[in-house]
Amino acid sequence: MHTKLDACLDTINQVLLGKEAQVRLALTCLLARGHLLIEDLPGMGKTTLSHALAKVLGLSFQRIQFTSDLLPGDILGTSVFDKDSGQFLFHPGPVFAELVLADEINRATPKSQSALLEAMEEGQVTIEGATRPLPDPFFVIATQNPISQSGTFALPESQLDRFLMRLSLGYPARAAEKALLLGEPRRSVLPTLDAVLNHAELAKLQAEVPKVRVSDALVDYVLRLVEATRTQPQFAWGLSPRGSLALLAAARAWALLAERDYVIPEDVQAVLPSVAGHRLRDQADPAGHGGGALVQWLLREVPAL
């Protein structure tokens, strides 16, 4: 099974060049049954990564382009009257796919954002009084542009907290960009990808993640990290219990990807920036994006043993 996970990583890395660390984190997020927020400039490969993940994991894929006039019904679906049967027939919306790409989620109104975020949290949606379960597995990859803020509705902290991880792809290295310029267009490579995992294999891997062993000493390290965010004066607020659970789940999935059945402090340190960065704010700038510097402080100052 681990050879298949390596094959997944290798296949995606052939499409998204020079982003091995981010691809590994994205797969970690999906194995831990989390949702992923990718924050980056246009044209960095956010959509390509989402397409490649769906292809390799054999998941049905839908993209929702969020705009200011998007309505909750455009995401969830609507009931249409059928005159032949004399009844309302439900037409499911794009949220009923296994992997949903919510492109530029901060461009939609809070009402439309909350429709998707309820689906993420509950694994089901309630439409016109009827509760409909979403497919299993169900993953959301949301993207937003951190630079262009005009005409956007920033996700509040309570909704950011629903994402297990936040990633930024960043500019490619020179060698990777050269290979990209000399190679085939990415759009022609994506359709050639084959599914490496089927649904049963993916479900089995996800079931293995909670079984990865965690020692008392490692849990104490996670608690020291969490307590530092709650007690140190530079943090506007601390990590919530959901944040500490997310950190442990991501560390377990990272260890599984490294072919280990136990977690070590390096696993926690590898996932901490992605898991905690969007959940933390600097006391001096509670409305800003100071999470990255605070995470580096935690890695530097909190002892692992």
Image: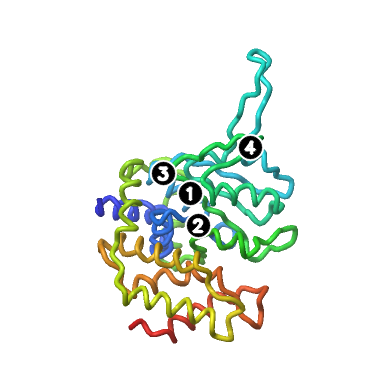
| Disc 4 and disc 2 in contact, CB within 8 angstroms | no
| Disc 3 and disc 2 in contact, CB within 8 angstroms | no
Q: Mark 2 points at which residue?
A: 36
How many marks on residues?
Answer: 4
Rate crowding at label 3 as few (under 14), some (14 to 19) or many (20 or more) other CA atoms within 10 Å.
many
Q: Quadrant of residue 31?
A: bottom left
| Disc 1 and disc 2 in contact, CB within 8 angstroms | yes
Q: Nearer the viewer, residue 104 or 290?
A: 290
Q: Name the residue under label 1.
A: 139
Q: Earlier in the sequence, mark 1 or mark 3?
A: 3
Residue 127, labelled with which disc?
Answer: 4
Cα separation between marks 4 and 2:
25 Å
Disc 1 element? strand
Cα separation between marks 1 and 2:
8 Å
Question: Closer to us: mark 3 or mark 2?
Answer: 2
Q: Which of marks 4 and 2 is nearer the N terminus?
A: 2
Q: In this view, does 33 lie above or below 249?
A: above
